[in-house]
Image (spheres, rainbow, N blue to C red):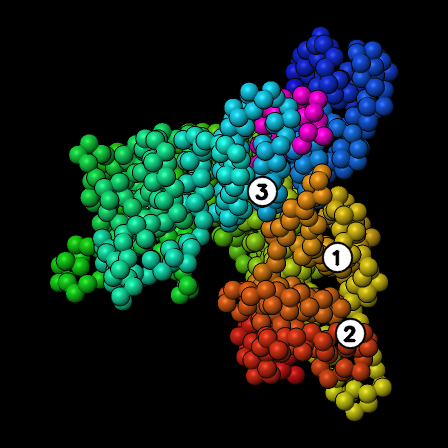
Amino acid sequence: MLIELMKNRDKLLPDEEFHRLASSVLDAPPRQAIILSRLLLIQDERFTRMTREQIVQKAVSSGFSHSDVEHWEWILQAPTSDAMVTRFVSSESHQPVCFLNLILRPNAIFARRTSLESLVRYMAKWYTNAEGSLRDKVDPQALRIPIKRLASHCSRSWPDLFPALAQVVALHIQTGIPSAVREDKVYAAQTLAYNTYIPAFAAAPDRLGRQYMHHIWEAQRIILEMSSGLQKPLLLEKASFNAIRLVLVGLRKTKGDRDAAERWSRTWPPYKVVRDGLDEQKDPEDDYTRPIKAGITMQETGYARTPLDDVIDTLAGAAPDGSPTIQTRANLGGLVKRGHKIGPEEIWATNIRATRNAHEAWLVFKERPSEGCQRNHKVYAELFAKLTAKAAETEHYQAGDGRHVVEVHIPNLSDFEKARLQPPTVVQLYKNMIEASIKPEGHCLNVLVGSATHFEQFYKYLRDSTLDKELVEWFSDTSSMNVSQVFDRLPFGVFHSYISLLCRLHPSATADNPPAGVENRILEAIRLVSEYADAARAQGRQHASLLPLWVTLLGRLSQPKGVYSLEHAWTGIGFAALLVYIDVLGRARKSCTIEREVFFYTARAVRNAVTAHYVPLMRERRAKALHLADDPEGSTFMKTHAEAHAEDHAEDHAEDHVEDHAEDHADDLSSFEARYKSGELKPEDVIALMGDILARTFVESTRRVPPLIGEDGTEYSLPQTYHQLRGTEAHIYMQTLAHLSNYPAMLDLLEWIAEEWEKDASPKNRFHLKRAVAAFRALGEPVGAGEALEPLHIAKLNEVRERLQGMEAWPEDEEVEAYVEVTFAASSLLVALRG
């Protein structure tokens, strides 16, 4: 009821539904949740049956304090979820659990990491020891909903907070529950909570779960270690074993796993190659992966195997019949959430997935595992996935690390045998499937439409599928229905593929003015995603699935080839694309937390918008540098509007600025378009403001996080932010800062690069970090005009240069020239840099 009334604030409920809720609230006894509901009702003008004063008076007469009720009302009046959290935790007193549930409602949007941090600290304060609210006998089971919801919110934006939340859960089980229940019921209550939260963490990941599965495992490990430290360890139920194994399947290979994978022969089925005496001494059990070892422990505990165990073991390196498979990383959180019924066809499909390439997948596809097992859309889906997968591009990649395929090994066979082993094409396999009266659906349909290269192919797959015919007409633009009318029936994977296809087929901008008759597909994609987000918000759906849609749009808008914009053609391709990008980013912020996810794209969009003005600037700098060489005191370092803006507002990039202004970002972006059209903002103002947003995101992504401190003073370290910059983001950000002439920020980024290099970054990350330093040298060095820099900047540059040179991270002149040749080969900037 509370959540329904909160939705009424965003979009008014129909009169009939609103009055039904109002009547049920008025007739109910004045519990805390009812009082909160009444306080929400009076925010709607349609509610006239009680005044605010009457609601407060009834609450006071029921035993609640006047100050508490006013404080609750103040929290409910907060304009955003982040502001609501700030007000919620501002009091030193305990708040109702139902209020915590309301704040963590599934459709809440938290733009600041500190909001979730604050809620974790709040739970640690009140629910982990005898001095908290559990002292007043709050039912421990009442915490299941807020903890599960907080885990869900962590998975959407800041999964690095999972271990911190797990610390709270562990303390809650270890010390909080014994203070709240009778001694003879403590163990049962602890066991129930233990087997509630381990699966809850495994069920939290969304479609992007593989990227942060290690945080989920760390959270589970903390709870498991807590149990081991108890006088009587808690018993794991079968569901908890499943949850642990599903998380282990989603982790990256260990060093031992990678070494074992190197020993597989290149033939199929593979066998272990003995490389030396150490390999010869190994037992088969020595190469068992972590999921398989956990499965053995599960069986030793007394639990029987289920089909789910066969799926997990197959992905972990061993098929049900004992034959080897390729260890394959997978996000199987959906199996925990939805409890899919698993049959022999699903296990067969998993066997096809656990191969290295389409050739091996085809061999498994042809071999029926049992007489009664029939190929279905799931079996075909995995072979389609292998046929459409891209080849791995790096030597470090091993089969099973992702969806990429690796090199095919063809033994010395006759041409006839090679042809027999050759897998079919997608067209041939699709024809075979349709002739077998198997229609594409689910994952199979997602794979097919995701591989479509033109609309006719896309529509053909839809027409042949099990999809609702009205939906097929809707995708074909022959239906008058809008997104909200088909939202409940719209498969996310198909919709996302359609948006991706619209973005891919949108024509590249080759001139400021679009040719006659050009189809503006990107605007159609923006409209559809916006309507989809509105429908999701109106129906109170969770917003985790919206992120891939917005990322697809923003990725396309930020590409160097740009997009045509009929409204802003005269401003130039790059700036016109930036205006559209800003509009889309503003819309995205209303439905999900996205800034750190698209930091790379935002930096690239700003760089593209400035490039046309940056080329003549570089030529002028070259000339200025030559003049300074002859007359060192004759000039000063040239400033653009963006550079002056950056210097005037340098203090704005501090951490407190990030906290104070995070809530205003969406309003800033939503007003950009109108302010620009009215003439209030000039192009350089827009560029400078976007530079500020990038700087704030950089600070928030790299700031140090204080520890979680328990009531006894114990410190539990919180990990640094999940969305930390990598070398790829640092490289594009360095280019953007150079285009903005923000030299102080470039030095700050150089300093951060030195810190990252010292952390023993991966070879791939170091490669891109060094490219960022090369970008600084190519674009940021004031070309011999060192005397024009502030003494503070010169000292900072010398210090960071010395650090980077000591780590061999400072590129030499030859490396910088090679970087310029490769990076700007197709750009007019190349001539300007050469002078």
* Mark sitting on residue 21: none
What is the three-letter code of the residue carrying label 1? Asp
Q: Circle 3 sits on which residue?
A: 162
Category of crowding for the residue at label 3, using alpha-carbon neighbours closer than 10 angstroms: few (below 14), some (14–19), many (at least 20):
many
Point out the frontmost of discs 2 and 1: 2
* Mark sitting on residue 692: 1
Q: Residue at x 31, y 38 (%)?
A: 310
Front one among 432 and 37: 37
The CA span between labels 3 and 1 is 30 Å
599 over 233 or under it: above or below: below
Q: Is residue 718 visible?
A: yes
Q: Which segment is the magenta one?
A: 129-152
Q: Secondary structure at mark 2?
A: helix
What is the three-letter code of the residue carrying label 3? Phe
Q: Earlier in the sequence, mark 2 or mark 1?
A: 1
Category of crowding for the residue at label 1, using alpha-carbon neighbours closer than 10 angstroms: few (below 14), some (14–19), many (at least 20):
some
Q: Is residue 169 visible?
A: no
Tell whether label 3 touches label 2 (CB within 8 Å): no
Q: Residue at x 63, y 75 (%)?
A: 804
Residue 735: x percent and y percent? 65, 68
Location of residue 277 by image quarter: bottom left
